[in-house]
Image (cartoon, grey):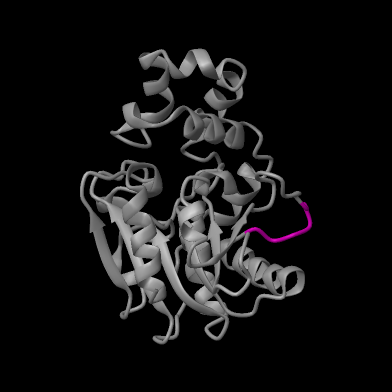
Amino acid sequence: MTNNSNPALVLVHGLGSAGTIWKSLIPDLEKDFTVYSIDLPGHGEAALDNHEKYDPRSLGEMILRHMQEVHQVIKMHVAGNSLGGWISLEMAALGPVQVESVTALAPAGLWQQAPMMKIPPSIDSRILAKISQFFMPIAFHLPPLKALGYRKITHLWRELSYESCRDSVIAMARSKGYKPLWQGIRGQKFDSAVNPEVKISVVFGDSDLTLPEELAQEKSLLPKHAKWIRVPNCAHVIMWNHRAITIRLIKETAGI
């Protein structure tokens, strides 16, 4: 977080991730924004309170309150990936005066049928992360092991840096909020109304294996004024595959 004279940009990560996922983007984003990379409850450095509600709308409300009470930030732009993208959209619905723009990167919540399973579909990734966190340097340099951990997330798994893999493994392995936040998603879709004055870009890669087009990219659930963007040769964690494009889209949506 730097340069408080710049407009605020709140970054919201996905389920089983942490604020560290934005690490490679932040130096360039800080040229135009005061950046706040949020850890969701039970993720990264954030505590988990079993008495809180963890559905996406409640999480959005929690972040808006946190930004105002802790950072005295009332006006902000928001960008989020996966669950973070969904939360970002809820923030726009809850706070049309506070939230000026949303860049939703492969947002969850746009599925044809809301998920009802008690166990998250990525539970195997969490188990693998818990094991591989103890021998990351070896696992990273063995293609079969690296593929096992990342080919379901991106077809460009070979190109992932060691730092990105290390940070994501640690985040997933230590995410105490993984199951509680999944329980908050179960049976829900994004269906909130957003004021047309809030600029919205919804961005999906054309090779998203986590939230594929035929199952989880229902445009009718979005506000009519939302801009839909398709990025070629790109998977679910868009900032891993196309860092420069992600930065550009966030800035363009914010009008910067």
Report the side of 199 relative to 205 (left or right). right
Mark count: 0
Q: Which residue occupies 58% across, 35% down?
A: 172
Q: Which residue occupies 56% across, 34% down?
A: 167
Considering only vertical position in the picture, is 155 above or below 33? above
101 and 215: which is toward the camera: 101
171 and 210: which is toward the camera: 171
State whether residue 109 appears in this view.
yes
Image quadrant assignment for residue 142: top left
Report the side of 77 relative to 180 (left or right). left
Residue numbers of the magenta segment:
49-54
Report the side of 97 relative to 226 (left or right). right
Q: Which residue occupies 69% across, 61% down?
A: 53
Residue 104 in the image: x percent, y percent?
41, 62
Residue 225 in the image: x percent, y percent?
32, 80
Figure quadrant of the N terminus: bottom right
Q: Which residue occupies 70% across, 72% down?
A: 65
50 and 29: which is toward the camera: 29
Residue 201 in the magenta stretch? The answer is: no
State whether residue 191 appears in this view.
no
Residue 59 in the image: x percent, y percent?
62, 63
Considering only vertical position in the picture, is 77 above or below 48? below
Report the side of 123 relative to 199 (left or right). right
Image quadrant assignment for residue 106: bottom left
